[in-house]
Amino acid sequence: KLQNTSPKLKQLAQKAASRLQFEAADDQAFIAVQNAIEEVILELQKLPGLSYLEELKLVLPPGAPSSSLTERLLRQNAELTGFVSRLSEEKNNLRNAVVKLEEELRRYHHRKPSGDYEMWNREKLSLQKSLKQAELEVSKLRAELRSEAFLRELGSDSENALLRRIYGKYLRAESFRKALIYQKKYLLLLLGGFQECEEATLALIARMGGQPSYTDLEVIMHHSKGFTRFRSAVRVSIAISRMKFLVRRWHRVTGSGILSISRDVFSQNTGNELRSDSFSGGMDLYGEQRHSYRSRFHGTHADLNPVSFACSQLQNYDPERALTDYIHRLEALQRRLGSVQS
């Protein structure tokens, strides 16, 4: 609009300078120029930061002299021209800044992910790992603190009692383990005696019509009576000494008199059973009753000749009673084995 109104203003200014008379067309052109300038001023006022243009409002009262109006129009035109030039410069500067920003944006878009991004990812992973390790350490420290607090609450006496109890459990398990070895040896010995009894029983059944001689029994058995008794006595003595040692050690660790007494009684009973079962051997086949170790021991010393002892037993032999005793002993052994397993 300013470009369209500038030639009209120049024409009116030339007429005013040459002092020519204004015509009706000139008045209409002047009014149009005035309206155009007012519209431009209104548009400029709408722009931000241009509040000072409010002072440039044209107040053209009707009937004003044309020379003063022309001068004011020329002055305002010059001001507007300078302002337009400044605006164009700012516009060019802004356009250049926008172009630079667009170039930088395109460069960032086309550029591939650099090493910084990968380095940031590595740092992120390392920080996450360190965080997990720190959490694990914190949990471990908390567990240690809880255990230390628990130990402080227990105190030294409770710690000693706990250690004694654990050591007692260990000794008991060890004694049970070693006792199983002697039980195994005893069972093997007992089974060997029963095997010999079985062989003797089968031989007697085969010779049911007559009395067997001692030589026949000696042929059936693999070892002599003296060797079997000596082996039984040695094993019983070893078992007794071992059980006494275990009882003493258990009593020394636990300090329980009642428990040690019960253990002593149990060991004595077990030793008596071992001695009675071991020294009975194959002689229970002939109706001999079970007695204590002392009676067996004195009986053995009283009768030093195994041949005469066997003959005396054969003379008092009762087949029916021997079979009944044999069945009772088998049942007792079965019950004992069941109690040991339980």
Image: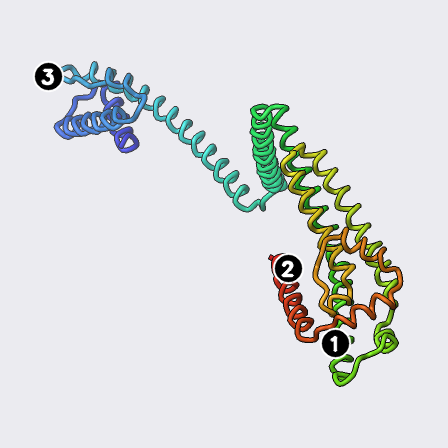
Instruction: Identify which residue is drawn at 62% across, 24% down.
Output: 157
Q: Callout 3: few (<14), some (14-19), or many (20+) C-alpha neighbours within 10 Å?
A: few
Q: How many marks?
A: 3
Determine whether the residue tagged by mark 3 lies in a helix, strand or loop.
loop
In percent of the image, x 77 and y 48: which residue is there?
240
* Element class at badge 1: helix
Q: Position of residue 278 (x, y in %)?
A: 77, 59
Q: Which residue is mark 2?
A: 336
Q: Earlier in the sequence, mark 3 or mark 2?
A: 3
Q: Residue 328's spot in the image, x, y percent?
A: 63, 67
Q: Of 301 and 133, which appears nearest the observer?
A: 301
Residue type, label 3:
Gly
Q: Amino acid at mark 2?
A: Arg
- Residue 201's disc number: 1
Task: Specify whether residue 116 is in view.
Answer: no
Horizontal side of residue 145 vs 209, given as left or right = left
Above-or-below relation of 271 to 256? below
Q: Quadrant of the N terminus?
A: top left
Q: Position of residue 149 (x, y in %)?
A: 57, 25
